[in-house]
Amino acid sequence: MAIFTTFLLTFNTFGVKDISTNHQTGSLTIAFDAQTISLAEILTILETWGISPAIAVPASTADMWQETWEKLQTLVPLLVGLLVVRGLSLSGWRAILTYLVAAKATRGVMKQLEIETSYHQVERPAKENTQQ
């Protein structure tokens, strides 16, 4: 901690406002004024001391949509199967059979939508290149 106190005292005039450490997790948090000192400058100084950053990179929008789509592919067929069985007021082996068929059909429709979407994404840039 003494090393970070020295860092804080040294760089306080350069925009570093506060430094805190968590010995349990091994993390270091630095509060700084981005108008005075940049993140790149702080990282460069820390790297000279042998401290490497562990910056969480935010997921891109495409990655978030892909993750959401994957979760929906699991959830939607189950819900459709339940809704069909409940809507038809089935019970017993007929309910199980109907549930399985509805869930399988929903998975097939979703798979087809995924194939068509990927086909159109590939087709669109090809058309744009031929028009230029």
Image (tube, helix red, strand yellow):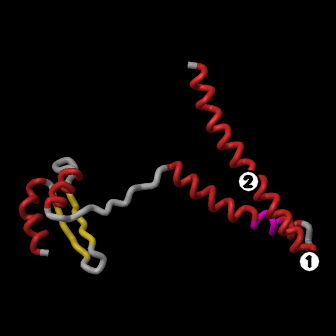
Q: How many numbered discs?
A: 2
- Name above or below for residue 44 compared with residue 96: above
- Name above or below for residue 84 compared with residue 42: below
Magenta-colored stretch includes residue 111: no
82 left or right of 22 in image: right
At horizontal 13% and vertical 69% (from top left) the residue drawn is 4
Image quadrant holding the N terminus, namely: bottom left
Q: Which residues are magenta?
A: 78-83
For badge 2, the amino acid type reads Met
Q: Nearer the viewer, residue 79 or 120?
A: 120
Residue 110, label in figure: 2
Q: Nearer the viewer, residue 41 or 52?
A: 52
Q: Which residue is mark 1?
A: 93
At horizontal 16% and vertical 49% (from top left) the residue drawn is 36
- Name above or below for residue 110 compared with residue 8: above
Query: 10 Å neighbourhood of mark 1: few (<14), some, or many (≥20)?
Result: few
Q: Where does the image place residue 43, in percent across and percent down from the top left? A: 21, 56
At horizontal 22% and vertical 51% (from top left) the residue drawn is 40
Q: Where does the image place residue 52, in percent across and percent down from the top left? A: 24, 63
The quadrant holding residue 45 is bottom left
49 left or right of 114 in image: left
